[in-house]
Structure formats: C-alpha cells, structure tokens
Image: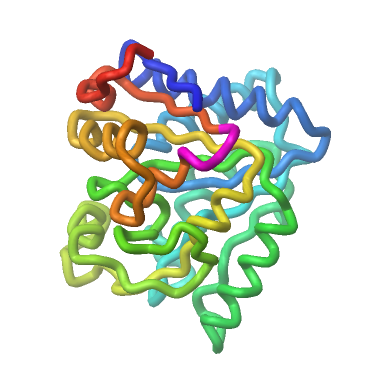
Amino acid sequence: MRVHLAASAAAAAERAADIVEEALRTNPFPSIGLATGSTMVGIYRSLVNRCLNGSLSFSKTTVYLLDEYIGLDAEHPQAYRNVVMRSFADLVDLRSEATFAPDCRAPDLNKEARRYDSLVRAARLDIQLLGIGGNGHIAFNEPGTPLDAETRVVELSQATRRDNARFFDSDEHVPLQAITQGIGTILQAKHILLVAQGAHKSRPIRDALEGPVTTEVPASALQLHGEVSVVLDPEAASLLSADY
C-alpha cells in the first residue's frame, strides 16, 4: 500500500488524477471503476481538463460504476449514472457505449446484481476509484459486510442515508436501497485508488490503514490487496501514526 500525503484537498485531487492517468497508460484499452461523491469532483475535473487540453484521451477506455441507487427515475439528477455522465463521461472523448452500470429498474434486481458482478469481474479493472464513508464503508458495503461479498442489493444504513441527504431535497427522498459492488468484487481490480479529504475522514482512514482487517471497517479489506494507492489531504491523514 502506497500512501500519498498531499498539501491540500486540491493537490490531493491532482495527485489522484495523476495515478489514474498512469494506470490508463499501462493498457491500450483500459478500464476504470468510477465512484461518486464530493471527493471525486476535483479528480474528475482534473481528468476532464487533461482530456480537453489534449494530454489524455479516453477514446479507448471503458468505465464501470461502483454502485447505483434503487428507486430513482432514470432522469433523476442524483442517479449515479447521471452524476458520472454529467461530471465526467459527457465531458471527455469517452464512447457513448463505454459506460456500464447496474440496471436498477430491472424486473429481477438480484439477477441484475449477479449479471453486473460477472461483468465487472470479467473486465478486471485497471484501476478502481474509491472514497470512504464515515463508518469505514466502501461503495455501499456497510460494517458487518463479509470481505468476500459479491455485487448485490443492499439496504442503506441510516448513517449513510443521512450523509447523502445533502444531495437530495430532504432526508425522506434519499433511496432506501442500492445495488453495490461487493468488497470481494472491488478487490478483483488490478489497482485500487482510495482518496479521502477532510477531518471527518481521519478516523475511518486510520482504522482502515492501521487497524486490523475486520468486517467492522470494510475499507480495512484493502490491506489484503497488493496494489493500493491512498491519497490524503492533511486533515484526512491527521490521525495516522506511521510516517508516510
């Protein structure tokens, strides 16, 4: 595991974009796993700028979403596919057919989760982007999730729904369920990039990087992977004891 300490949140976003770019250049037809959330905004902005200035192309790239809400209309602005399209995919030279996500309006959601799990595992992503939740969750894998969990339908915890309420008109509009890649699915990626910013991420970062591997801190499973990069701003790194 390589931990990169950046001087600021903006510098962390740039360093994360550097790591994504490095991973993309290792494969002529690369694949990326995309996450959503405020941590990803600066990273996507940097990648978009690199594409617009001609230094980076996504024309041969395929992208796979980490998770998706259940119960939102196809055009809802907070559906994760729409977030990714609006903040990244529609702004670069990515092919229109190159974005994959679970279909949360499928008639059999459990079957759809299994289909998407097989798709992601077969892709063997070159790099998977991740944020971390306040309770140590990655994607929508809450504490207690088995470390070998596959893509599946999950109930969102009250803590996660409360964290995500800022993106909706009110708490009651936050979906109750989602389809999420499982921890075991995430660990199939060749390279995992975890990015965290802000003091509120300092405790889960400490527990994930320096604590024991445990289902109570889902992100601690990243210690089991051989190719993980972690990019932190000073506040997110503030509780780490090791000298990185």
* Quarter of the image where one finds residue 97: bottom right
Q: From the image, which quarter does the C terminus lie in?
A: top left
Specify whether residue 181 is painted magenta. Answer: no
- 131 or 83, which lies in front? 131
Q: Characterize the magenta stretch by its predominant secondary structure.
A: loop
Q: Residue at x 36, y 19 (%)?
A: 10
Q: Which residue, as the protein is rendered here, is positioned at the far bottom?
A: 107
Is 8 positioned to the left or the right of 13 in the image? left
Q: Residue at x 71, y 52 (%)?
A: 98
In the image, is residue 106 above or below residue 62? below
- The spot of residue 34 in percent (x, y) is 54, 46
- The spot of residue 224 in percent (x, y) is 51, 42
Is 195 positioned to the left or the right of 134 in the image? right
- The spot of residue 49 in percent (x, y) is 56, 24
* Quarter of the image where one finds residue 194: top left
- The span shown in magenta is 223-227
- 156 or 17, which lies in front? 156
In the image, is residue 40 above or below residue 173? above
Is 32 positioned to the left or the right of 193 in the image? right
- The spot of residue 138 in percent (x, y) is 39, 50
* Quarter of the image where one finds residue 120: bottom right
- 151 or 89, which lies in front? 151
In the image, is residue 161 above or below residue 237? below
Q: Residue at x 53, y 67 (%)?
A: 151
Specify whether residue 226 is painted magenta. Answer: yes
Q: Residue at x 41, y 29 (%)?
A: 42
Q: Which residue, as the protein is rendered here, is positioned at the far front?
A: 212
